[in-house]
């Protein structure tokens, strides 16, 4: 009797645990995947109804553009932190 009730208990618990894996519902993340990227892309367009221009951009000379680009790339580097050293005890010279 005890054995049958134990097996029934184990069977019910395992079915209950596995039922959570069986029901897959789509989450809100899956429903809106890529929406933030598209919104950011559309918000960067100043005039939506204007056609794209094939002309070269003007307003910055080459040297200023290169310096700005280098400064932009340096912004992604991690700053060097202080070096820590740990010394245990002291070192004596032998004579």
Image (cartoon, grey):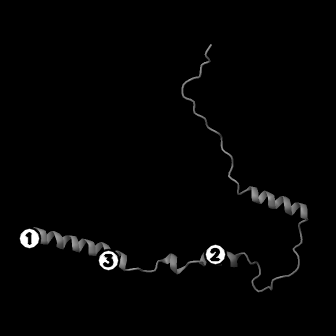
* Mark 2 neighbour density, 10 Å: few (under 14) some (14–19) many (20 or more): few
The residues tagged by marks 3 and 1 sit, at their Cα atoms, a distance apart of 27 Å
The residues tagged by marks 3 and 2 sit, at their Cα atoms, a distance apart of 35 Å
For residue 36, side relative to residue 52 (left or right)? left
Lower sequence index among marks 1 and 2 = 1
Q: Name the mark on residue 37.
A: 2
Foreground tag (3 vs 1)? 1
Residue tagged 3 = 19
Foreground tag (3 vs 2)? 3
Q: Residue furthest left?
A: 1
Foreground tag (1 vs 2)? 1
Q: Quick check: marks 1 and 2 in contact, CB under 8 Å?
A: no
Q: Nearer the viewer, residue 40 or 1?
A: 1
The residues tagged by marks 1 and 2 sit, at their Cα atoms, a distance apart of 61 Å
The local secondary structure at tag 3 comes to helix
Q: Position of residue 33 (x, y in %)?
A: 56, 78
The local secondary structure at tag 2 comes to helix
Q: Position of residue 62 (x, y in %)?
A: 90, 64
Lower sequence index among marks 3 and 2 = 3
Residue tagged 1 = 1
Q: Quick check: marks 3 and 2 in contact, CB under 8 Å?
A: no
Q: Nearer the viewer, residue 40 or 24?
A: 24
| Residue at position x 10%, y 68% in the image | 2
| Residue at position x 75%, y 59% in the image | 73
Q: Position of residue 24 (x, y in %)?
A: 41, 79
Above or below — where is 92 with respect to 78?
above
Q: Name the mark on residue 22.
A: none
| Residue at position x 17%, y 71% in the image | 7
| Residue at position x 19%, y 71% in the image | 9
The local secondary structure at tag 1 comes to loop
For residue 94, side relative to residue 52 (left or right)? left
Residue 35 occupies quadrant: bottom right
């Amino acid at each position: 009797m005890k054995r049958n009730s134990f097996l029934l208990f184990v069977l019910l618990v395992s079915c209950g645990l596995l039922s959570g894996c069986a029901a897959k519902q789509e989450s809100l993340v899956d429903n809106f995947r890529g929406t933030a990227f598209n919104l950011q892309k559309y918000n960067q367009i100043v005039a939506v109804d204007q056609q794209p221009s094939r002309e070269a951009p003007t307003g910055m000379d080459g040297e200023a553009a290169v310096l700005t680009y280098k400064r932009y790339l340096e912004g992604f580097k991690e700053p060097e932190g202080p070096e820590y050293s740990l010394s245990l005890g002291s070192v004596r010279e032998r004579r």
